[in-house]
Amino acid sequence: MIQRHHAALLEVRNLRVQLESRRVTLTAVDDISFDIAAGEILGVVGESGAGKSMTGSAIIGLLEPPGRITGGQILLNGRRIDNLSADEKRRIRGREISAIFQDPLTSLDPLYSVGRQLCETIQTHLGFTSAQARRRAIELLSATGIPGADVRVDHFPHQFSGGMRQRAVIALAMAGQPKLIIADEPTSALDVSIQAQIITLLKRLCREHGTAILLITHDMGVIAEAADRVAVMYAGRLVELGPVRDVVRQPQHPYTQGLMASVPSLVGERDGLKQIDGSMPGLDAIPSGCPFHPRCGRAVAVCRQHRPGLLAAGPAAAACWLHEPKLAAAFAAPSRGAGPVA
């Protein structure tokens, strides 16, 4: 497990992302903070609409209008990058930060061979000659597990299977030797057996190259297998942050407990899978206080009135008043307001 005294490669401090129109301003990412060390995989998990992908887009500088960063800071190796110009952000993308998306075809141009796309990226960011770039492209394809890389380098995206295309995208993401990769649902479109291979590949990249990875997914199984630490998001906010092993075994936030209770287990006894009642609120209907309180079986008055920050909860931190010692008595008897989550 990564020790937290290591210097952070990426620091996200009080990040806020809003969607603005003439009539309304909606907050999609609300005051979140975390960091990632070199060689670490931080998993970001939550339901659709939690703000996971918006966070990744903000970091890499690819927010689509009307979304924009309205608060906080993003630092890479101690240098602030959220306030750079469009040209400066473009120079960082590919060289210092790369991305892997859910659909490989959004990253690969169907009109050019995979090798040509790799060579262009390598030459742009590393200044290699054409011959050097081609050798490097073959090395990258081979390193990502594509057999016959010296031949496949001249093939077009449509000549690759889904799993092989995703490997090619990972090779493309690594081409500029970036320090950080934003991987947004990189395995969700793949078969389970291919998912495992891609996860193994990402873990090897971290181990061998010291690359940091922000792994965005809705799948707690992927997080448990791949990540060192996990950040759980709900309604644009961080609700739990801690080492994967601890969060998976003993989740400290009722929402995380609900997520874990809905995951099938091959070991131990479980009466059956449980679901979290209700649904995540829309950006225009986020309740006051803790945004999870309408779905939480342990909510009390303070949960409805005041938003909790991240509080110490063993090896993790959880944004839940349950972990505020002064309020322990209030949680001794669960309220009858909502259905249980775990």
Image: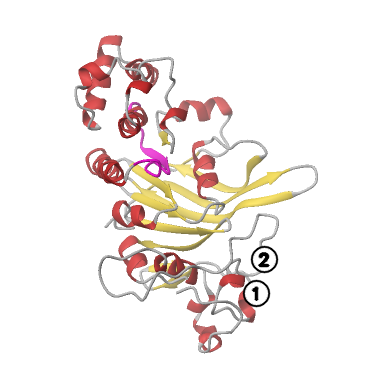
Task: Pinpoint residue 308: horizontal percent, then vertical percent.
Answer: 57, 70
CA gap between label 1 and label 2 equals: 8 Å
The amino acid beneath tag 2 is Pro
Indicate the quadrant where residue 225 lies: bottom left
Question: Contact (CB < 8 A) between labels 1 and 2?
Answer: yes
Task: Pinpoint residue 86: horizontal percent, then vertical percent.
Answer: 57, 28
**Residue at image point 54% right, 79% down:** 298
**Residue at image point 55% right, 45% down:** 54
The amino acid beneath tag 1 is Arg
Q: Residue furthest right?
A: 23
Indicate the quadrant where residue 210 lies: top left
Residue nearer the viewer, 64 or 277: 277
Task: Pinpoint residue 180: horizontal percent, then vertical percent.
Answer: 38, 39
Looking at the rendered structure, the secondary structure element under dot 1 is helix
Label 2 neighbour load within 10 Å: few <14, some 14-19, many 20+: some
Which circle marks residue 287 in the picture?
A: 2
**Residue at image point 58% right, 29% down:** 85
Looking at the rendered structure, the secondary structure element under dot 2 is loop
Task: Pinpoint residue 151: horizontal percent, then vertical percent.
Answer: 22, 16
Q: Earlier in the sequence, mark 1 or mark 2?
A: 2
Segment colored magenta: 175-190
Label 1 neighbour load within 10 Å: few <14, some 14-19, many 20+: some
Q: Does residue 44 sit above or below 176 in this rendering? A: below
**Residue at image point 54% right, 35% down:** 62
Tell me how many marks there are: 2
Chief secondary structure of the magenta span? loop
Q: Which residue is mark 1?
A: 304
Quadrant in which the N terminus appears: bottom left
